C-alpha cells in the first residue's frame, strides 16, 4: 500500500501492519517528554498505576521550561517533584538550570529527536518535531505516564491533509505567515486528528528552522502531527545538532492517498497577523495597522530560534522601541543566547530598548515575565492568542512573525517592516 509520511513513520515503530487510516496500532516510542507543568501529573499517574521504573532512563526528557526561573512557591514545588523523580529514576535528560531551554527548540537542537523518530510529549506543541521528519504529538499526562513505564502507546492512524505551498516568497514573508495563512484557510479544527503533510517548491526551499515553526502550529489547526519530508536540509541540520552521519531520506510515496489537498500560492502575499482571540482570525497587516499596542514578545517554541533572533535584530538595528511599548526578547535556548551574544544581536536588542530575558516559555502561556494587564494589547511570536492566554481576560494578543513583531515594537502599533 502506498503510504503517507505519517503511515510510514508509524509503521516503522509498530509490529502491526498499517493498512488504513483510522486503524488502531501499538507503537514503540523513541522519546517521552514532559515539562514542569505536565510532568508532576504524569509522575503522579506513573506511581498511581503501580509503576516503579521507567522503561529506559535515556529515552525520557524532563524540561523545567515553563516557569524558568520559578516565579513562586507553587511553581518551585512543581519543579521539586520533577527533580526528585529524575534523581530516583536516574533520568539522563533532566534540565532545570542554565542548561535548560524551551523544550521544543531545545530537543532538536541537542539531537535528542531526529528524523523517523516517534515522540510523545505532555505538551500540545510536541508536534514541532515534524519539522525534521519525526512523528511527534502531544498527549495527556496519564498517557505519558503509561509511555514512560512501557515504552509504547497506541495510536489511531490519522488521515493526512496535504498542504502544497507554491509561488515566489516575498521579502518579508516568513514561515510563521505561511502557517497562519494555512490555519486561516482551513480553520482551527480543519485538521482535527489528522496529519498535516507539507510540500511544494516553497517548502522544499525552506530552511529547517522555518519548518519547525510551521510544524509547531499544526496543533492550532487541530492536527495530530505536522510533517515534512527528510531531505538534504534536514540531514545538514541534524549533522550540526547532535546527529552526524545521517543518510536517511524519508518522503511519502508518490501515489499515497490524501484525505484533502490544499494549495497555497504566496506570490505577492503581505505579512499577516492572527487577530484576537483565535489563531484562524488571520488578516493582512495592512488591515489592522495602526492598532495601538503596549507589548511585544519575541521568542517561544514557535519563533525563539537563532533565525528568528536575526530577523528581529535586522528590523531593530539602529532603531528604538516606542516609549509606550515593552519589547521582551526571550531566546529559546542557551545556545541561541550564546549565538546572539557572539553575533552582536544582544547589543542590538539592548540599544533598541528591549528587555532581554532567559530561555523560558514565560509569557506565552500567561506564566510570568510579561503578563498583560486589563485592556492591554500585544504582538507576539507565540502560537496561541485565546482570551486570557497572556494575562487579563480583557487583554488582546496578535500573533505574528519576528519581523512584524519587531516592526510593531518600533512603531508602537501593529506594523509591517516594509513601513519603517
Image (spheres, rainbow, N blue to C red):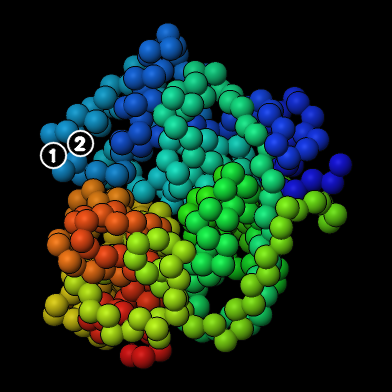
For label 1, the crowd category at 10 Å Cα-Cα, with few meaning under 14, some 14 to 19 and many 20 or more, is few
The answer to whether residue 62 is seen in the rendering is: yes
Residue visible at 34% across and 65% down in the picture: 276
Q: Which residue is identified by label 2?
A: 75
- Check the image and name the residue furthest to the bottom: 419
Q: Which residue is identified by label 1?
A: 72
Label pair 1/2, CB-CB below 8 angstroms = yes
Side of 364 relative to 31 (left or right): left
Side of 97 relative to 323 (left or right): right
Q: Which mark is residue 174?
A: none
Q: Nearer the viewer, residue 15 or 222?
A: 222
Residue visible at 35% across and 81% down in the picture: 288
How many numbered marks does the figure carry?
A: 2
The answer to whether residue 316 is seen in the rendering is: no
Q: Which element carries disc 1, helix, strand or loop?
A: loop
Q: Quadrant of residue 420?
A: bottom left
Residue visible at 59% across and 52% down in the picture: 191
Q: Nearer the viewer, residue 384 or 287?
A: 287
Query: Where is residue 14 shown, x and y percent of the image?
Result: 71, 28
Side of 340 relative to 11 (left or right): left
Q: CA distance from mark 1 to mark 2?
A: 6 Å
Relative to residue 270, is residue 81 depicted above or below? above
Query: Where is residue 187 shown, x and y percent of the image?
Result: 53, 60
Q: Which element carries disc 2, helix, strand or loop?
A: helix
For label 2, the crowd category at 10 Å Cα-Cα, with few meaning under 14, some 14 to 19 and many 20 or more, is some
Q: Nearer the viewer, residue 419 or 184?
A: 184
Image quarter of the N terminus: top right
Relative to residue 15, is residue 242 depicted above or below? below
Query: Where is residue 176 shown, x and y percent of the image?
Result: 48, 67
Relative to residue 8, is residue 288 depicted above or below? below
Query: Where is residue 356 shown, x and y percent of the image?
Result: 22, 63
Relative to residue 89, is residue 58 depicted above or below? below
Amino acid at each position: 500500500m502506498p503510504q503517507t509520511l505519517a503511515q510510514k513513520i508509524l509503521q516503522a515503530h509498530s509490529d502491526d501492519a498499517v493498512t488504513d487510516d483510522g486503524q488502531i496500532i501499538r507503537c514503540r516510542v523513541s522519546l517521552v517528554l514532559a515539562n514542569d507543568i505536565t510532568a508532576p501529573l504524569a509522575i503522579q499517574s506513573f506511581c498511581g498505576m503501580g509503576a516503579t521504573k521507567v522503561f529506559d532512563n535515556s529515552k525520557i526528557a524532563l524540561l523545567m521550561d515553563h516557569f524558568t526561573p520559578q516565579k513562586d512557591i507553587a511553581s518551585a514545588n512543581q519543579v521539586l517533584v520533577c527533580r526528585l523523580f529524575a534523581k530516583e529514576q536516574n533520568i539522563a535528560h533532566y534540565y532545570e538550570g542554565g542548561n535548560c531551554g524551551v523544550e521544543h527548540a531545545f530537543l532538536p537542537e541537542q539531537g535528542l529527536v531526529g528524523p523517523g523518530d516517534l515522540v510523545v510529549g505532555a505538551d500540545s506543541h510536541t508536534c514541532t518535531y515534524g519539522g525534521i521528519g519525526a512523528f511527534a504529538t502531544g498527549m495527556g499526562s496519564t498517557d505519558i505516564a503509561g509511555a514512560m513505564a512501557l515504552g509504547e502507546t497506541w495510536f489511531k492512524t490519522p488521515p493526512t491533509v496535504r498542504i502544497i505551498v507554491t509561488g515566489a516568497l516575498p521579502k518579508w514573508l516568513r514561515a510563521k505567515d505561511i502557517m497562519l495563512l494555512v490555519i486561516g484557510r482551513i480553520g482551527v479544527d480543519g485538521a482535527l486528528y489528522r496529519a498535516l503533510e507539507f510540500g511544494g517548491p516553497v517548502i522544499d526551499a525552506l530552511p529547517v528552522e522555518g519548518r519547525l515553526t510551521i510544524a509547531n502550529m499544526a496543533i492550532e489547526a487541530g492536527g495530530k502531527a505536522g510533517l515534512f519530508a527528510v531531505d538534504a536540509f534536514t540531514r545538514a541540520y541534524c549533522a550540526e545538532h547532535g546527529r552526524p552521519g545521517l543518510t536517511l531520506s524519508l518522503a511519502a510515496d508518490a501515489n499515497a492517498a490524501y484525505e484533502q489537498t490544499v494549495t497555497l500560492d504566496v506570490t505577492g502575499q503581505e505579512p499577516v497577523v492572527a487577530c484576537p482571540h483565535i489563531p484562524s482570525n488571520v488578516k493582512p497587516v495592512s488591515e489592522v495597522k495602526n492598532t495601538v499596542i503596549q507589548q511585544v514578545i519575541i521568542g517561544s517554541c514557535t519563533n525563539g530560534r537563532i533565525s528568528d533572533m536575526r530577523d528581529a535584530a535586522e528590523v531593530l538595528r539602529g532603531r528604538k522601541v516606542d516609549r509606550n511599548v515593552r519589547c521582551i526578547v526571550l531566546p529559546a535556548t542557551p545556545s541561541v543566547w550564546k549565538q546572539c551574544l557572539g553575533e552582536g544581536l544582544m547589543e542590538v536588542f539592548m540599544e533598541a530598548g528591549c528587555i532581554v530575558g532567559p530561555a523560558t516559555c514565560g509569557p506565552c502561556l500567561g506564566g510570568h515575565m510579561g503578563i498583560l494587564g486589563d485592556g492591554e494589547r500585544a504582538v507576539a511570536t507565540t502560537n496561541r492568542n485565546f482570551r486570557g492566554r497572556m494575562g487579563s481576560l480583557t487583554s488582546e494578543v496578535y500573533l505574528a512573525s519576528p519581523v512584524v513583531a519587531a516592526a510593531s515594537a518600533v512603531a508602537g502599533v501593529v506594523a509591517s517592516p516594509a513601513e519603517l
